Image: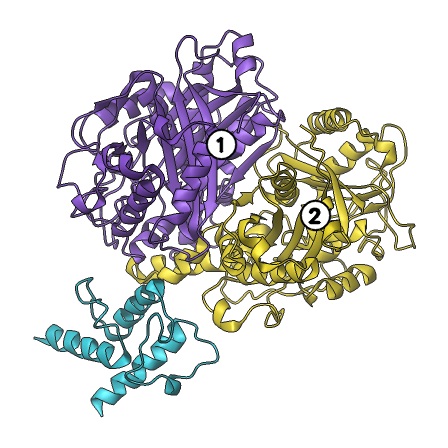
Chain colours: A yellow, B cyan, C purple
Amino acid sequence: MNSEQSVVITGIGVVSAAGCGTEPFAEVLATSDVLRTPIDRSAGYHLANSSRTAVLSGGADLSDWISPMKARRMSQPSKQAVAAANMAISQARFDPEDLDRAAIIVSTSYGAAEVTEKILRQAMLDGPETVSPALFTESVANAPAAQVAMALKAKGPNLTIVQRQAGPLIALAHGVLAVSSGKSSIAMVGAVDEVNPLMHSILDRFRALAKPDDDGVETARPFDQRRSGFLAGDGATVVALEAETAARERGVRPLARVRMTGRAFDPTAPRTSWSRDPGSLSESMAKSFLSHDINPAGIDRLVTGGCGTKPGDRIEGLVLRSLFGGSSLPPVLAPKGVTGESGGGFLAAVVLATIGASFGPTPGFENEDPELGIVPHDGRSLPDPTEVLATGFAAGGAASWAILEPA
Amino acid sequence: MGESGTKGEIKNIIVEALNLEGMTADSIGDDDLLFDEGLGLDSVDALELVVSLEKAYGVKIESDDATRESFKSVETLAALVDQLRDSSLT
Amino acid sequence: MTHDSRVVITGIGSVSACGWTANDLHSGLLSGSSAVVEPAHFDTSGQRTKVAGEVPPAPESIIRKIPEWATLSRSDRFAVAAAIEAVEQAGLSEGLPAAAVIFGGSTGGMFECEEYVGRLLCTRASHPAIRLLASQQINSPGDAVARHLKLTGPVQTVSSACASGTLALGVALDELRSGQSDVVLAGGSDSLCLLTYSGFNSLRSVDSRPSRPFRADRQGLSVGEGAGVLVLENLDHALDRGAVPLAELLGAGASCDATHMTAPHPEGEGAATAIRNAIADAGISVDRVDFVNAHGTGTPQNDVSESRALHSVFGERAAVLPVTSNKATIGHLLGSAGAVEAVSTVLSLIHSVIHPMPDGGDVDAELDLDIVLGSPRSVPSAGVAISSSFAFGGANAAVVIGGWEEGSAE
């Protein structure tokens, strides 16, 4: 099963609340600058006392990476995915001809939320015959992946993964397999999401969002005793994968190597939440490490999906504790405290953590949860990591993880 | 004048409904080819236009009406719209 | 390409307009009537067209097997029912836990989500029940299957519109060949909903009559709903536990047109590539293929580009290679189409019969294909079939499925 072929990341593109590009995004992670902005509640979807903010990327200026004429019929996720893909390709310095058979794998949780809402509004309020055909073509979950393929003229395998918080690392696993199996010389792996007012109001009604604290600020508090929910976030990240030997031959310095990926499911999780019992996922992760002959003791950085939800952070914390046996955990990063939940932020943070980018203090963390005993990163300077474990545990039970190392 | 009014309206609809950012209605000539090598609109744009024109003018554009000929340019579209409006009055 | 590991199909399950089992699908496809009719529960008021491939009410015997029935969305129910049927047939009720679930879908619980949005928008309800949204995600049916069967292996859903189901089979095949799993439940589930029904109508892609793929007077597709699940296993794993395979998943192929969001490549190039890739992956010659379970939606464009693809792959043989489309009977099941059509292909191989499309209209002679219309055709023993799906965004996928008989293991 394990291929000889080592797979590396040679390019990355990010669209986030910080704008277009990896640098502004890295800056935001380094300073823990939570770019929350008010969500538009004028449509009346929200309850009166709802959460009111999110970390939104819609204002990012994409014009350097996708022309307005090309973007005119695209949903926000599609446009952002194309822009991010173009950034990643530019960094990887691929020849356009090499992209002909590139595999494109994109993960999304919600798809094109705004477009879907618009169609439903048209159909319900004005009648089905007023539904806009251009909107419908952008409403399919694979629209971003298809638009990336068209922009890159990539005719290789094209896959869209929908698996909530576990999606990005599942997509990464597929990208690695596409390259290591020899099926594709290049894989473009992306994660994209859009949070619009309707989606935000729904997350709020599920009581999933961070509540305002005493000074009215909604703060996600990963692993904190007082955590009350996550900050919704959106945006896109695309990474370019290729065989390490190919990258070196091209004279391109890889950013990171993907050493291992894993997936599992916890059937005891309720549909919209996480399980109370970490046993199943702990066992799955332990088996995965064993079968890959990897000792957790070698991991010196954790990039968790911890985002401030009570049950989600809890199970992730307990499973990680179990994985590391009695030992203390390596430094725990929880980038979703800054980037918000969903979109490409997590995937980008995983890559940045691997190349040794600096991360500021975990927003909102004040007191450890005694049940977890996890103290996430406080912003101090850390030595460059050698093995990074990234984990994505989805509401509903799916889970994925990956180990990356600097290349 | 009635006719140029319709053409002007249709140009605005084209720019708005098809999200032609950076274009103004004035920049579309009455006889400019709209599809393929012309303005570069495609089959989905055509369907989009049908929906928008139906909404704007309260007419029904059947597939028989929505031909390559009638959708060739703003001129031909205006003629189609006028014809449909007239026939719905009788 | 050769593989040490062969992958077989040991169980199938299906829910469609023909009924809640794979046998219902088989008899419905053989019956000669289309199950695309005016739906009893799905509301088509204000829609340009009035027919659909709606799943009939579930029999008590199925509901009894699913204690969580009341909490599941429509598409969840189809998925779980089909999975139960497949797993029972495979004789895998015990010792299942490590199995993976690879599903394809495009709607998830959108039907129920529309109920929620409708209450918000139309009745201005301030607190519509959020349980209507609990299964909204496209990955909900696949997750529901894993939850019902208490599986702990990898679970994922792929969503590439109408190619999802066939793509899921390809992903499952990779999963098994790479040794990451020994058993995979591959399938898909979708339900009728306002979004897709209106959406396809907005593209003027829907025929007001039940669709007539490959006919000269075809005018579009019919939207349908349902689920298909196949139990896929590594051959050794199946034989070790004394299971008798129903069929073999020989190969899978995929490609992307990368040209247009909705229109297929006019020459069917991407589709041809996917089919060729599948045949190459199966390690067989093109001449081994005995029939094609086509994408065959019945839209003027698809059937042309699909026929060109078939001519490109099969050359002169294309004119005499039997081609059928299940969509004429059950409608286009969107994300789950590939899964249900794979089940139908396995049924064809087991029963040595190619299901015909219901009679109606002349075949489009310009396509120059051998269309199975009206009467079923026989399949040679250990026959080989292609099942293909082509989607929005130019995603194309195909699988090669072979019949199984005694001695096939050698």
Residue drawn at the location 49% of the way across and 60% of the way down: A114
Is residue A209 depicted above or below A268 in this figure? below
Please tell me how crowded label 1 is: few (under 14), some (14-19), or many (20+) other residues with Cα within 10 Å.
some
Taking depth in this image into account, of C279 and A25 the one nearest to the observer is C279
SS for callout 1: helix
Residue drawn at the location 33% of the way across and 81% of the way down: B11
Q: Position of residue C128 (x, y in %)?
A: 47, 49
Tell me the residue that label 2 is attached to: A246
Please tell me how crowded label 2 is: few (under 14), some (14-19), or many (20+) other residues with Cα within 10 Å.
some
Taking depth in this image into account, of C146 and C43 the one nearest to the observer is C146
Q: Which mark is residue A329?
A: none
Taking depth in this image into account, of A139 and A313 the one nearest to the observer is A139
Q: Is residue C299 visible?
A: yes
Q: Position of residue C241 (x, y in %)?
A: 54, 8
Tell me where residue B76 sits by quadrant: bottom left
Kind of residue at badge 2: Ala
Tell me the residue that label 1 is attached to: C281
Tell me where residue C211 sits by quadrant: top left
Q: Position of residue C234 (x, y in %)?
A: 54, 19
Is residue A369 depicted above or below C93 in this figure? below
Judge if badges 1 and 2 mark residues of a common chain.
no
Tell me where residue C247 sits by quadrant: top left
Q: Position of residue A168 (x, y in %)?
A: 64, 45
